[in-house]
Amino acid sequence: MLGIIQKKYNSCFIIAEIGSNHNGDIGLAKKLIDISHDAGADAVKFQIFNEENLYSKYTPDFSYLKNKNVYNLIKEIKTPREWIKELHDYCLQKNIEFLATPFDYEAVDLLDKYVNAFKIASFEIVDLELIKYIAKKNKPIIISTGMANLGEIEDAINSAKSVGNEKIILMQCNSVYPTPPEIVNLKTIKTMENAFSLPVGFSDHTIGIHISIAAVVMGAKVIEKHITLDKKMKGPDHSFAIEPPELKEMISNIRDVEKSIGNGIKEKSNLESEEMYLKARRSIHAKVDIKKDTEVTKEMLTVKRPGYGIKPKYIDLIIGRKVKRDIKKDEWIIWKDF
């Protein structure tokens, strides 16, 4: 995955998170793959879990799920494991990366044949044994960090490194659905980058596309965003996902923003033409008619466009000098005039 990111754009790798928004319909899953490909996403991602390995039957209801029993909900929204090969092969046909988040050991083994990188969800960052098991597959690991502090993130990183895997990407993330902008804290992208010397991305659960675009400006190397065919569809993740036109707009804007970031060197660009440089910049002009052999005073001079004359910063150097020719009012003054 690190190689893919650097080879393709040397910047931001964009993941369209399908997750469970296929609503149990493999046809819809493929349609979302089509949409992601057409919008220019680099990868699509699914989630592979089952209710028995993920939640206790006695787990209290979540308020954001409108108090629906989470155990029963997981049964409804899970991605069938028998889909994995078919979805992978379809992505291969479409030339888009197939990714998935495993939530148990069996899912890790099943996915190993089909993914070039593993994603670890925020809720799993404290399961260090699962992280080690994934890391042993020796593939890049993308770790979401929702709710985690730096110590917990360090534990996860060290767990992966302890089995010889240092191919790690961290993701700033908030485990609130949807996430209000005031808690996003994009500055932590730089904080984690500096703390761990690892590439950092952003897993976005906010409404809209603007926060993802801002994350790229902050240095995010990966953007992950939930997508849906229609926000009004039934399911827990549709309401804060983005629809096809938004996905296309987000990716287009990110690519433009990447181009605009530049190299940090302040200089005239190649596209800022010499004509514009000369005609639109200011230079020293005659404010009045100046006769030959007249000693120039400041009152005789003005600064205006175009920039064919002497640069304004040299005005004090020509005051007191005698001109070698008659200079008409509004002519620009050049060094040969002295």
Image (cartoon, rainbow, N blue to C red):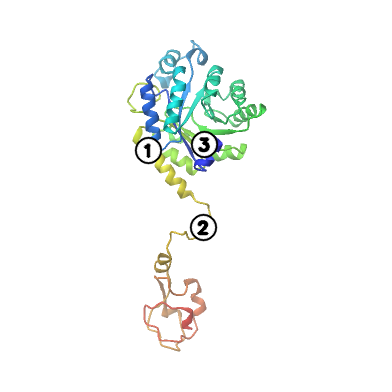
Up the image or down, 330 lies above or below 266; here it is: below
* Secondary structure of residue under mark 3: strand
- Which residue matches tag 2? 266
- Which residue matches tag 1? 248
Asked which quadrant contains residue 177, the reply is top left
**The disc labelled 3 sits on which kind of residue?**
Gly
Which tag, 1 or 2, sits closer to the chain's start? 1
Q: CA distance from mark 3 to mark 2?
A: 27 Å
Q: Are marks 3 and 2 in contact (CB under 8 Å)?
A: no
Give the total of numbered labels: 3
Which tag, 3 or 1, sits closer to the chain's start? 3
**The disc labelled 2 sits on which kind of residue?**
Lys
* Secondary structure of residue under mark 2: loop
Q: CA distance from mark 3 to mark 1?
A: 19 Å
The disc placed on residue 167 is: none
* Secondary structure of residue under mark 1: helix
The disc placed on residue 201 is: 3
